[in-house]
Amino acid sequence: MKISDNFKYKGLRSKLVKELKIKGIKDENVLSAVESVPRHFFVDDALLELCYLDKALPIGNKQTISQPYTVAFQSSLLEVKPNDKIMEIGTGSGYQAAILSFMKAQVYTIERNRFLFRKTKKILFDLGYGILTFYGDGYNGLPKLAPFDKILITAAPPEIPVFLLSQLKIGGILVVPVGDSVNQEMLLIKKLSDKKMDVTKHGCFSFVPMLKNKS
Ligand code: SAH
């Protein structure tokens, strides 16, 4: 049973938001989501004291909850608007999905690891976020629910998963860290037409790999 939110955690979140501003996060909607969503609900009790530091933390099965800066940075690149239909690949702890949902997006999130899928589905349900969770291989996306306004990949593929661009609306945005298992470059791909994509680069990051198939 998770402890509830309180002034101590709210204070730590305000401090975290100040830190994210100093590090260059400007999107007010993103900052207010970080200020409001209790990150401590998404980590194990043993890590409660660490969860408002700007650090990635283990969530089991060799996976991590992304660093708050990274969550805020990817969320800013997505330019989230109310009612945006967003597919997230790599549910993990569910924290990133909760941030997008707080920003009033309709969130569809896919996880390939059955253990994390089950654990996080329950946490998101208990918290009352209307997020739809799917167990599957994100490389396939969600063809029956496409197209999406935005696609966010929170694990790192070795190259752009081109197939997923077919599930993006024209004018839509896909954000993905592409690279090897150590370093990746954050790419923002804007779909200008069915054949034309505008790709911009947004710095180096370190994510766990995007693996094929379910486990
Ligand atoms: N967004 C998460 C970050 C999770 S780390 C959070 O806020 O906590 C990346 C996650 O991607 C891991 O849980 C990993 O199991 C998952 N993953 C890796 N390859 C995947 C794939 N092909 N499809 C779906 N999920 C994948």
Image (cartoon, rainbow, N blue to C red):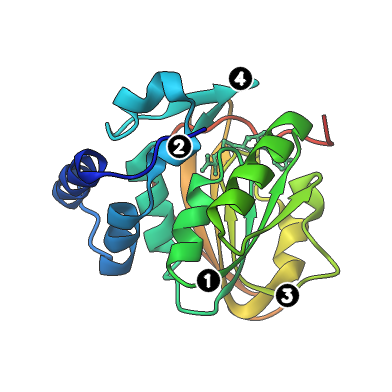
Q: Is residue 110 above or below residue 28?
A: above
> In whole angstroms, how far apart are the C-alphas of marks 1 and 4?
29 Å
The alpha-carbon separation of the residues under discs 4 and 3 comes to 31 Å
| For marks 3 and 1 on the same chain, the one whose residue lies earlier in the sequence | 1
Disc 2 residue type (three-letter): Ser
Quadrant for ligand 1?
top right
| Up/down of 81 relative to 176, above or below | below
Q: Identify the mark nearer the N-term, 1 or 2.
A: 2
At 47% from the left and 79% from the top, the residue drawn is 82
Return the residue at label 4.
62
Give the x, y percent position of residue 105: 53, 71
The amino acid type of the residue labelled 3 equals: Pro
Dot 1 lies on which element?
A: loop
Q: In the shown orientation, is residue 11 left or right of residue 28?
A: left
For marks 3 and 2, the one nearer the N-term is 2
**In the displayed structure image, the side of residue 199 where residue 32 appears, left or right:** left
Q: Amino acid at mark 4?
A: Lys
Q: Which mark is residue 66?
A: 2
Callout 4 touching callout 3 (CB < 8 Å): no
Q: Amino acid at mark 1?
A: Ala
Q: Secondary structure at mark 4?
A: loop
The residue wearing badge 3 is 147
The residue indicated by pointer 1 is 105
Cβ of mark 2 under 8 A from ligand 1: yes
Q: Earlier in the sequence, mark 4 or mark 3?
A: 4
Asked if residue 38 lies left or right of residue 180, the reply is left
